[in-house]
Amino acid sequence: MLTAALAILACAANAQEEVDGVTGATRQAAKTEKQKGILSRLHIGGYGEAVMTRNFYSQSFNRYKKPENYADDKSHGRFDLPHVCLNIGYDFGKGWTVGSEIEFEHGGNGTAVEIEAEEAGEYEAEVEKGGEVNIEQFWLNKAFAGGKFNIKAGEIIVPVGYSNAYHEPNQFFTVYRPEGEATIMPNTWHQVGVSLWGRVKNWRYEAQFLSGLNSESFTAENFVHYGATSPYEFKVANNYAAAARVDYYAGGAAARSSANPRLTPQAPWLRVGLSGYYGYTFRNTLRTPGAKYDDVTGALGIVALDFTLNRWNWIVRGNVDYAHFSDADEISAYNQANWTHHKYQDGNPHHYSNIGKNALAYAIEAGYNVFSQIPKLKDEKLFVFGRFEHYNTMASGTYTSMYKYTKKYRYAFGVNYQPVKQITIKGEYSYRFFEKPNNNGLASDSPLYKQPYNNEPSVSLGVTYTGWFL
């Protein structure tokens, strides 16, 4: 009887092992399926650039004030990581998505604590390297009607101008970002705000509500480029602004992912975009101006037109940007008064510079895929390109004559090699030049003779990637 009981127990154990085995396999399969579902909703990607440049001109900050003193300066080289970004997005379902982008500019920054032997062993914090770390994007998005209408809130890209809307390194030929737009406007322009955007057939639209820029951070040489930054732990929002963009696509449907609603490389062959910005910029700081500035607003208006043509093995891009800044003279006077008062104050975060009334930038670039004519290399691309651009941060205004060097022209020639879709290796020769002054036949030794600015050639090489890893 004992033998029979043991046999029954053994059979029961074997049966339970089979059940447990089936149950375990089922649970593992369910777990695997759940993980696949989570991964299918998760988006991880980014882009990065590593650059080597040789500049064949002076790097002195005074090279425009007395150009004759720097005409024979030796060349200098640079290694740089202009941008390295990590994008993470997730689709929670029911139209809810979140996106983020962490950007390390010029390799980020770093500090270290050292014990100084020359200072009796005191601890001292040292700045190890320059650079910036930014949260360039952090937003929550709710989609309605299959993406035809969306509400996005958080740190968002302000898509004014081509270079802000399309700033990944595979969306321009040059080694560095397009120079003109990156000079006269914030780039990449991002702020906390609310966006209403969507897609309807061949159209994409977007309207944004933002805090205004800060005129105390505007400069003669960079116009409003630094206006979106804040030295505080928050962005002052005494003034508000609006931005908008509309893109039209011809020849196909624009495919985008819900977690990354920007245009993908399988875009239609023609895109035309119109964008704009308007907002007040004065008093958008913690400082309170005097009563004599009660009527000053510093209204800033920007309008930009850009296009991309991608057909017949050609890629052609172009843009025109125009900006008007009201009360430029009054705010320049205010900035100068503050500079005089605070010029010996350590840690002053503002520029207090003269500012132009208008700024302008326009550019055209075109590249042809040479490998399109070689069947064995059809999976790779080699674009030979040329680019010309002009920009001026002091296109008009009272102080134009003081800053003639802000009127710049630049052309570049080079190649973009793409061994795979996500990788681009770039090489470029660039030549920045200026208008020669009209000396009306004056002798070069005349006290009225104006020395022309020295032209600024350079050679750059870069390796870049752009892609979604998951």
Image (cartoon, rainbow, N blue to C red):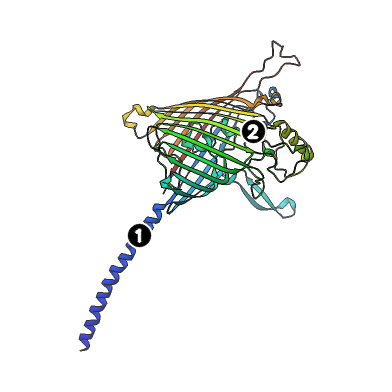
Query: Is disc 2 placed on a helix, strand or loop?
Result: loop
| Numbered circle sitting on residue 32 | 1
Q: Nearer the viewer, residue 350 or 117?
A: 350
| Numbered circle sitting on residue 223 | 2
| Mark 1: few/some/many CA within 10 Å (<14, 14-19, 20+) | few
Query: Is disc 1 placed on a helix, strand or loop?
Result: helix
| Mark 2: few/some/many CA within 10 Å (<14, 14-19, 20+) | many
| Numbered circle sitting on residue 156 | none
On the image, the x and y values in percent for residue 137 come to 53, 46
Q: Is residue 369 above or below residue 279?
A: above
- What residue type is disc 1 on? Thr
On the image, the x and y values in percent for residue 346 come to 75, 44
Quadrant housing the N terminus: bottom left
Please state which of the two labelled residues, at mark 1 or mark 2, is closer to the viewer.
2
Residue with the most extreme bottom position? 1
Residue drawn at (60%, 36%) of the image: 278
On the image, the x and y values in percent for residue 167 come to 51, 37
Q: Nearer the viewer, residue 267 or 452?
A: 267
Any part of residue 73 in sight: no
Any part of residue 280 in sight: yes
On the image, the x and y values in percent for residue 205 come to 48, 39
